Image (cartoon, grey):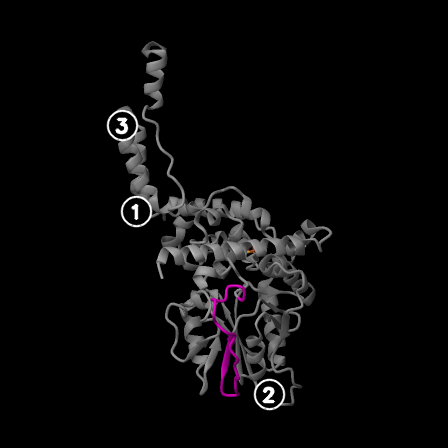
């Protein structure tokens, strides 16, 4: 098939998905009498959970242990990867699906042998995650739903939305029947979560799930979630099912120590900011979402990701849509400030600004022909500007030349 016609077809399919999402999103929002108040409550719930994270983590571990579950701590992505690979070593198969946490641990780029990805018939994670989060809608044409019959010897690696400290439960979006089959059939289940995905109480999780359901899937009904814990037997009985919860830190505690950037950890991964960001509109989802750009320097290092903050416009459009009232615009600005203080912009950025400064302080350079200035600026900023936008053109005459020509040299 001609690649351009395939891309065109893909674009039409995407816009169809976006339109249907937007419609169901605005319909489902009508259920809220005072949405702003709910958003404030959600912000407060996330703030409280993360403010006292150390205490609530211990509560969660205590409750999970009582339910015969076991917690695994992963301070870094590499430790998480090793821990997960070791824990998921079973005689049967490992069943999972693509997820941002697997990508963070490098298990999507380098998929382990013998792992069965449920969503391998769908679009890949990095293309679609948090842009079209309901991946059932993005099924490739002609692919059939598979039926699994997991056994005792198999292991499921699943990704709950939250973990709840007051009772040691985790909550999973049950939007695929295969997940329920895994929970029921596999002899071992490993839940993987980021450290920040903590809810203090069931009531808080209800509120966050309701908002997530509307903002992520565009549906008002949030009954499609499963609460589960360890084997839930009495302590005297021995469970046949092994439950483990792997909690990944990987820089999250560093981010937690930063005020105000810690707000980035309040995110409930609904994807609304990505879908409503000007960056996404301009580049059609080609680049990472604004919240990931804010977190990336903290989780992956300033040296590598500090430039991301400079790629997003400060329109504030994404912040308005966030269901937990995260001030994304402010966080982008803060990240830029940190990047400059740490002197971490790339060498090409340094070179660009040095050249800019030299040129701006020299009248001869300022009055140079527009052709060369246009070429230089376009070459420097091509990557940041993207392919979809026309780079602004510099006028043929500089302001200085215009002034002299229209008012004469005497008026300078
Ligand atoms: S920052 Fe807000 S809008 Fe963006 S994914 Fe997180 S919760 Fe959703």
The N terminus: image quadrant: bottom left
Q: Position of residue 167 (x, y in %)?
A: 66, 73
Residue identifier under label 3: 369
Q: Is residue 337 left or right of residue 46?
A: left
Residue at 33% x, 15% y: name it: 404
Badge 1 density bin: few <14, some 14–19, many ≥20, Cα 10 Å? few
Of all residues, the one furthest to the bottom in this rendering is: 237
The answer to which quarter of the image holds residue 224 is bottom right
Q: Is residue 390 above or below residue 298?
A: above
Residue at 32% x, 39% y: name it: 378
For ligand 1, give the image quadrant: bottom right
Which circle's residue, 2 or 1, is located before the other in the chain? Answer: 2
Please tell me the numbered disc located at residue 347: 1
Q: Position of residue 12 (x, y in %)?
A: 48, 55
Q: Is residue 90 above or below residue 200?
A: below
Q: Tell me the SS state at disc 2.
A: loop
Residues drawn in magenta: 136-157
Of all residues, the one furthest to the right in this rendering is: 33
Which circle's residue, 2 or 3, is located before the other in the chain? Answer: 2
Q: Tell me the SS state at disc 1.
A: helix
Asked if one can make out residue 16 in the rendered structure from this viewpoint, the answer is yes
Separation of marks 2 and 3 at Cα, in angstroms: 78 Å
Separation of marks 2 and 1 at Cα, in angstroms: 57 Å
Q: Tell me the SS state at disc 3.
A: loop
Please tell me the numbered disc located at residue 239: 2
Badge 2 density bin: few <14, some 14–19, many ≥20, Cα 10 Å? some
* Residue 140 among those drawn in magenta: yes
Separation of marks 1 and 3 at Cα, in angstroms: 27 Å
């Amino acid at each position: 098939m001609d690649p351009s016609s395939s891309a065109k077809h893909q674009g039409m399919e995407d816009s169809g998905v976006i339109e249907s999402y937007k419609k169901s999103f605005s319909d489902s929002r009508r259920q809220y009498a005072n949405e702003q108040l709910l958003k404030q409550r959600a912000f407060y719930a996330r703030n409280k959970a993360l403010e006292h994270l150390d205490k609530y983590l211990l509560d969660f571990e205590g409750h999970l242990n009582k339910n015969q579950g076991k917690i695994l701590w992963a301070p870094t992505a590499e430790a998480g990867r090793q821990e997960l690979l070791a824990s998921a070593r079973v005689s049967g198969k490992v069943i999972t699906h693509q997820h941002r946490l697997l990508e963070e641990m490098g298990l999507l780029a380098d998929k382990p042998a013998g792992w069965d990805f449920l969503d391998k018939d769908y679009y890949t994670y990095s293309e679609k995650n948090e842009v079209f989060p309901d991946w059932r809608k993005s099924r490739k044409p002609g692919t059939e739903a598979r039926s699994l019959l997991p056994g005792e010897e198999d292991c499921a690696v699943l990704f709950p939305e939250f973990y709840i400290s007051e009772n040691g439960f985790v909550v999973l979006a049950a939007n695929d029947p295969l997940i329920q089959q895994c929970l029921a059939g596999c002899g071992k289940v490993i839940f993987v979560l980021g450290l920040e995905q903590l809810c203090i109480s069931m009531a808080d999780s209800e509120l966050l799930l309701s908002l997530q359901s509307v903002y992520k899937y565009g549906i008002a009904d949030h009954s499609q979630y499963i609460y589960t814990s360890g084997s839930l037997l009495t302590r005297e009985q021995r469970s046949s099912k092994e439950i483990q919860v792997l909690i990944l830190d990987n820089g999250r505690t560093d981010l937690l120590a930063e005020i105000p950037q810690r707000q980035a950890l309040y995110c409930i991964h609904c994807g609304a900011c990505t879908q409503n960001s000007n960056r996404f509109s301009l580049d059609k989802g080609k680049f990472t979402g604004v919240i990931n750009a804010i977190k990336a320097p903290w989780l992956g290092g300033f040296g590598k990701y500090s430039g991301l903050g400079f790629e997003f416009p400060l329109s504030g459009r994404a912040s308005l849509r966030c269901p937990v009232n995260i001030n994304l615009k402010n966080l982008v600005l803060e990240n830029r400030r940190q990047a400059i203080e740490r002197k971490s912009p790339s060498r090409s950025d340094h070179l660009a600004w040095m050249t800019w400064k030299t040129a701006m302080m020299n009248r001869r350079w300022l009055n140079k022909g527009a052709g060369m200035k246009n070429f230089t600026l376009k070459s420097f900023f091509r990557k940041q500007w993207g392919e979809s936008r026309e780079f602004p053109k510099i006028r043929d005459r500089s302001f200085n030349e215009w002034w002299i020509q229209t008012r004469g040299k005497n008026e300078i």
